[in-house]
Image: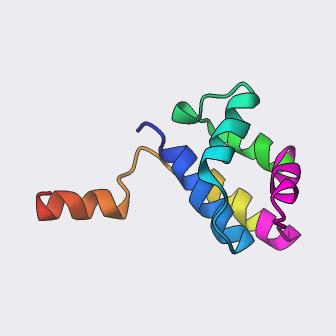
Amino acid sequence: MSRKRFDHLFVELSVSVGKRVPRYALWLELHDLGWNPESLRVAEALEFCDGRMEGFLSHRGLKISQRARNRLRRELVKFDPTRPLPEEIFERLCGS
């Protein structure tokens, strides 16, 4: 289950702003907050969205609308890292 929630946050945040956010910078930002991105909890991801996300994005010239922020929060809450991702299922099916 390692890193699934971080990966999900990265992808959903990138989709929400319409551009790829810098992955390593996001990792460092979460680490600076005292969280381990390898085992990110949903409460931490939501706290990031409600707190430092705006500054993180604006520092990189990115913006997020309120509607996109609300959607991002919903996606983060409903994500279950214990369920296999489609690519994991496909990998098992193909035997790779």
Q: Is residue 26 left or right of residue 50?
A: left
The residue drawn where x is 88% and y is 50% is 55
Q: Is residue 68 above or below residue 56?
A: below
The residue drawn where x is 81% and y is 50% is 56
Q: Where, by quadrant of the figure, is residue 82 drawn?
A: top left
Furthest-top residue in view? Answer: 34
The stretch in magenta equals 51-69
The residue drawn where x is 35% and y is 53% is 84
Q: Where, by quadrant of the figure, is residue 63 drawn?
A: bottom right
Q: Where, by quadrant of the figure, is residue 60 drawn?
A: bottom right
User: Horizontal and vertical percent for residue 21?
Assistant: 67, 60
Total labels: the figure holds 0
> Is residue 61 highlighted in magenta?
yes
Q: Is residue 47 above or below residue 85?
A: above
The residue drawn where x is 48% and y is 40% is 3
Q: Is residue 22 left or right of residue 86?
A: right
Image quarter of the C terminus: bottom left
Visible residue check, residue 79 = no
> Is residue 18 highlighted in magenta?
no
Q: Is residue 41 left or right of residue 46?
A: left
User: Horizontal and vertical percent for residue 23?
Assistant: 60, 51
Q: Is residue 21 left or right of residue 93?
A: right
